[in-house]
Amino acid sequence: MSLQYMGLKDINGPLVALEGVSGVAFDEIASIRLDDGTERIGRVVEMQGDRVILQVFEGTNGISLANTRTVFSGKPLEIPLATEMLGRVFSGAGKPIDGLGPVFPEKMGDVNGQALNPVARQYPRNYIHTGISSIDALMTLIRGQKLPIFSGSGLSHNKLAVQIVKQAKLADESGADFAVVFAAMGVQNDVAEYFRRSFEETGAIERVAMFLNLSNDPIIERILTPMCALTAAEYLAYEKNMHILVIMTDMTSYAEALREFSSSKGEIPGRKGYPGYLYSNLAALYERAGVVEGSTGSVTQIPILTMPNDDITHPIPDLTAYITEGQIVFDRDLDQRGIYPGLSVLLSLSRLMKDGIGEGYTRADHSAVSNQLFAAYAKVQDARSLASVIGEEELSENDRKYMEFGRLFEEHFLKQDFDENRTMDETLDLGWDLLCSLPRNELDRIDDKLLDEMYDPEKAKRFTENNAFSEIAAPEEK
Amino acid sequence: MNTIHAINGPVVKVAAAKDFSMLEMVYVGSKRLIGEVIGVSSGFTTIQVYENTAGLKIGEPVIPTGAPVCATLGPGIISNIFDGIQRPLKDMTKLNGVFVAEGSAIPSLDEEREFDVTVTVKAGDKLAGGDVYCTCPETALITHRCMVPPNVSGTVSFAAENGRYKVNDVIIRITLDDGTELPLTMVQKWPIKQSRPVAKRLPISRPLITGQRVIDTICPIAKGGTAAIPGGFGTGKTMTQHQLAKWCDADIIVYIGCGERGNEMTQVLEEFSELIDPKSGRPLTDRTVLIANTSNMPVAAREASIYTGITLAEYYRDMGYHIAIMADSTSRWAEALREISGRLEEMPAEEGFPAYLPSRLSDFYERAGYVETLNGKEGSVTIIGAVSPQGSDFSEPVTQNTKRFVRCFWALDKSLAYARHYPAIDWNNSYSEYLDDLADFYTQNVGGEFMQLRREISNILLEENKLMEIVKLIGADVLPDDQKLSIEIARVVRVGFLQQNAYHKDDTYVPLEKQMLMMKAICKLYKLSLVAIKSGVPISEITALGFFDRLIKMKYDIPNDRPEMFVQCFRQMDEAFRTLSV
């Protein structure tokens, strides 16, 4: 029988303090048994002499100074790991909550994870095909990348995440050993249910491990959720050689939980009240994506976060984008105009894309097309801001062409149906067709040889024809 | 015995200990984690631990080493990759697998590797600090020169024969002035937080040539100078640093990945071993040292990585080399200071950063310089630090304080990056204080017109900046022809000259001579067009000649090694404009 400590010294929010403790290690896990027979889990977060401070994952409701018996486990928090985790649902702390009983562990894994040695990493190069034009062409997702989605409340980030999971396939393989780890932090019941149902409908559920911490679950458990999910992902990827896509939503709730915990610990706050170590803490999660030597698996992360007040300079999106390899940003204006997925192309970026596209990966002209689309769309913004001052009629011929290009680009390239899965060729050809609506000398990012081969103003005609058709067709539909 | 009294993240306290001194290196706990003393009082000694503290227990021992945290200096540093406290990451993978484990006591340098040593002194020679006593080829590009440690002098009592030696073999023995004998191996230690002494600092006079047009011509950096690259995420800080590390004409590059992405370090490792330096025909790794303390590695070691990097650089400078340090990113380093400071419950200044942030930053940047070394050679350390301002706001404390200590400021601009204008260095907000120092070099070595052309290019950009205010309000169509010309020519400068394609074989590095000819072509076109417009030719006719578009593409169309094609271009320009005025 291990040593039990009776009672507590202090309780402060999710933290409890014990005195007279010895032989305890930093970061160790303790179980706190209440008189009513329930058990809670705590983690050592600070030690001073014989005084130990524990962070209680399930919250301190109902705990008094006298009704507890605490036992230290002598180990950091570990969760059982096995391939059979796929298809199962867990709590934020890694306990099964689907009523199917415990997971039979092939191995126990420390949820804290260790830093990957940069020398042992392989540089990610193979792209993941998502079937979404804007992502595939302009912010290509690479296997082993961490590419967050920056969204706002009420935008369609969840729908996009589901579409990515549904359509994602590895470019060079059948996708047989492809699986998804889904971590929900502080999301509403409905949203978690939406994801579960969508996975079920698409048949993906068998290949999904879900870690759910809903918005009414304890906040400390929320801090554990991504750690547990990533521990499972690393096991499946590096030891079982699977390609794992990790979706983490919503990182904003996670960071807020961290702030709450930090303030109850009495730490000195940094920007906007978030703890000074928010960057290191987020990095410890995001850096757990990658491809390592000696394994054919990979961990790819798509964290989703809602920008408070749509502010991209808020500490959470700001620090995230400094760590992740790019970002996919939603634009409220496009969304309101009914364009799904309404991604802000100019704000979005994939840092690893340059080495994962082109000859041998996607198509030789990919980089030229995407650069030119970016540059042209940037000019659209200039033309629009000018038009908002002097009116569209006063614009020069050139600027009017850009205005038209902007409209076509948003209508045909960005906009896509939830079920529409475009191939890379379709996407890039669509890009060419759009570029052909501009005068040839405006295409300064593409070299002449390629232009000779591909540039043909006739290609752009199909948009105007289609438009004419839809103008006629639209009233009939009504 | 001293034991652990309290643990809070990376900060550990020892109660009532008297035998620790400030900045001393200590071993913490039974795993012997490496730590550094950062506070001493009669009650507690405060220690920051460079490794993950999970699993440490109260009551475990803390062992003083009697010395500050030191870098191990000797052959085997170049082409290696270290973590923030100079542990070799490659050797660590052999020992611990793909993850970084705690308490790995691995020697910094390979102790088994043999070098071809030439001993340059003989018994009886008098040596002082900084004198070279043996040399060996470290890589195909770098000859390592072992130097007497700066604070040592005496007479050589024994010198080994030339031959193959390992780094810990004794090469010479010195009888010090007080009669004791000191054996010297090929290795010496130096405290990372202390700068290595030099004979004297020399004035700055030579540019660090980078082959990047916006840097070399608009905001040049000098050898021995300091520069900061601030920019929000996605503006290309890392990309710019990679380009500089690949192409700048320093002898050795120290690349510090401080709190940045793991994949980026992997990329540097891969790319640099594949890329061949055109000057030497050897892979770039032969002249590069990498220090990688990625964002998820322990935060205290992140703080140390900057000091480790600069100490290695100073060591090679003392051998007479020119070193460029890329520190990516100093903001992460400042955040490490903030994090530790928070754990110590120090009174924060701006935005939670400690009040000593400016003094730490100036300590770092002041270690750059062009010097005469103790052994009479010339060497330099150039520091190029990336800054990642929170929320892309340049008024935040790290950017503002850095600005006070650097003389070259390359501000990266979001809107340029969004338009995929790379390098996204904003010519309006960037500056270099080295222009006057370097004017003589450019005039003598590149061409007498260089500085004049540079000024004209700057003026074109300034003029455009002014006109754009009007254009934003009323559009470009209403401007008179000479102002339209200004806007057209400024477009050529921006797209044809400032924009540079890092992925194009010629454009990724452009020699100064071609940079000057490109400027000359633009200025010539401007002058000819201006004369034509004054004589009443409409601008549409001038643009119809096609030279504006041709100059935009000259960076691709004219190879770096064919400057004579510019002469041809100038002639065609003259001819075309002559027909125009007729």
Image (spheres, coloured by chain):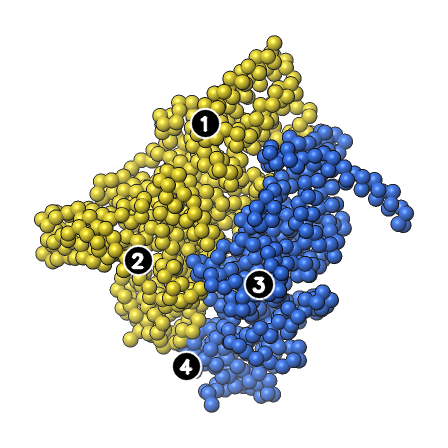
At 86% from the left edge and 46% from the top edge, which residue is drawn?
A: A474
Q: Are marks 1 and 2 on the same chain?
A: yes
Which residue was labeled with disc 2? B109
- Residue B177 visible from this viewpoint: no
Which marked residue is nearer to the observer: mark 1 or mark 2? 1
The amino acid type of the residue labelled 2 equals Leu
Chain letter for mark 4: A
Which residue was labeled with disc 1? B562
Chain letter for mark 1: B
Determine the CA span between mark 1 and mark 4: 77 Å
Which marked residue is nearer to the observer: mark 4 or mark 3? 3
Q: Is residue A176 above or below residue A431?
A: below
Q: Is residue A177 above or below residue A60?
A: above
Q: Nearer the viewer, residue A296 or A385?
A: A296
Which residue was labeled with disc 4? A22
At 77% from the left edge and 31% from the top edge, which residue is drawn?
A: A393
At 31% from the left edge and 35% from the top edge, which residue is drawn?
A: B203
Which hue is chain A drawn in? blue
- Report x, y in % for residue B226: 39, 42
Q: Which numbered disc, 4 or 3, marks the residue that appears first in the sequence? A: 4
